[in-house]
Image: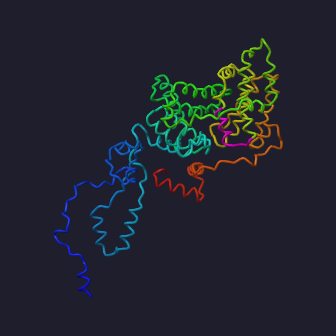
Amino acid sequence: MVEEEKLSLPVRTAATEKPYHAKRPHRKTRTGCRNCKTRKVKCDEARPTCRSCTIRKETCVYLAVSKRASPTASTSAASSPGKGPATALTLAAKHATTVPQQPLFIPGGHSELDMRLLWFYTTATYASFSTGGLRERNVDVILKVNVVQHAFAHPFLMNSLLGLAAMHINHLGIHHMGVSRSQEIRYRADAFETYRKAVEAADPASFPALLACSLLLCGLSTHVFRGEEAQPLSVLHWMGIWKGIGAIMQVIKLPQLFRSGIAALVFRPDVDLDASARCLPNYLLFMVASIKEGDPDYDLVQKYYKALQFLGSLYLELKKGISHMLLLRICTFPTFLPDPIIDAARQRRPRALVILAHFLVFVKFRIDSCWWMDNIAELEIPSIYRYLGAEWHHLLRIPMASLHLESGKDIARLLLDDPDWDQPATLVEEEPLTSACERELAIRAVREDDVSAEVTEYRSKMCQFGMC
């Protein structure tokens, strides 16, 4: 039987054997970048960016290489009679699961604090400019990836990201992250100074980054509404910063904007002016209708009506329910205001200030999702009330009453003058984004007093990526 099996095997002869070719000598790499390792391709290990990542326009990250045991130690461990195969396997498993604690490469010109602030921005701070999973404006990836890519090429944008993250950390009171108030002020000052110089230079290549920066500055400039830096009626200058977005839009060309990958950041929902006007409180319409010839505001009557129509779009959206679209309309409202109305507000004309006070009531809806809008209404509505004389106080009854309300439902009932209003059951809320859950965990994880199971697990995961 054995002989039959031998006969059945193929006979290998010199004619059938393939000639042997020695492999071209090459060096094995174990220190390539993370992207090349993931794609299982050879990395040329060029610093700061390898050739593969340069071609693919990816962020090139090199990981620290864990130290190997010395040959002497390995030999002694293998020859030691007290350490059998089980011990060797345990040691091998321990070294195999060793995770680098931090990236080996930090971009030139940036400190470790810069990188921690950048991480905090991409984990938590970016979300204050998000409007959730809206089909029309789902910008989370743009804020976390595209904007950051532009920031590495344009220092003024990077300064804005870092300044915003520093301000967010101090706003939350996360003191052990090592961001002092003086550092926050320095980042903010650098952001405004470098932005001003970039605007003066007017380099077309920087226009997309300038556009993103003009949006971020709307949040970065809100330090004047809180704490020791609070300055009454700062909202008048803040509205002008919002208009800066439109100024950049006027010089940037649409093809360049779409190629930049950040076009969705400046999306504004359409406004039905006629329907919006029908939702306005009658006393606001009468305030403009009562302007007579000879009044300083007479030449601005049509501009006032236009501003009221845009304000009415907030009332119209609120009737549909408190949604992400309402929050987007609140954020974009200042960009719709006619320039003459902004100028009238800066001149502290009463009617413009009354319109502004009613907008600030809607700002209270944004506080939960937009930390940098915190305390704006609480500071500025009383400031407007004190500035205007008693003859205008009856027009500020609703804004002043809103200061005593906390829940969105109560504020909506006040604005709509409907004590029975409730969130419509037919409103389809967008699915919460995964990033929103991660954002909450990230903020809780940097608070030392939170030792819950989910936060502990999240901290462990972040340490694996060198983020702890």
Relative to 156, 420 lies left or right: right
Q: Residue at x 61, y 29 (%)?
A: 242
Range drawn in magenta = 320-332
Quarter holding residue 288: top right
Q: Residue at x 42, y 57 (%)?
A: 99
Relative to 90, 77 lies left or right: left
Report whether residue 162 is seen. Answer: no
Q: Is residue 387 above or below residue 407?
A: above
Q: Position of residue 223 (x, y in %)?
A: 61, 33
Q: Quadrant of the N terminus?
A: bottom left
Please name the predominant secondary structure of the magenta segment in the image. Answer: helix
Residue situated in front as seen by the camera: 53 or 467: 53
Q: Is 146 within the magenta?
A: no
Relative to 94, 123 lies left or right: right
Q: Is residue 13 above or below residue 198?
A: below
Q: Position of residue 292 (x, y in %)?
A: 80, 15
Residue situated in front as seen by the camera: 393 or 207: 207
Q: Position of residue 88 (x, y in %)?
A: 35, 70
Q: Is 321 within the magenta?
A: yes
Relative to 47, 372 lies left or right: right
Quarter holding residue 205: top left
Q: Is residue 369 above or below residue 356?
A: below
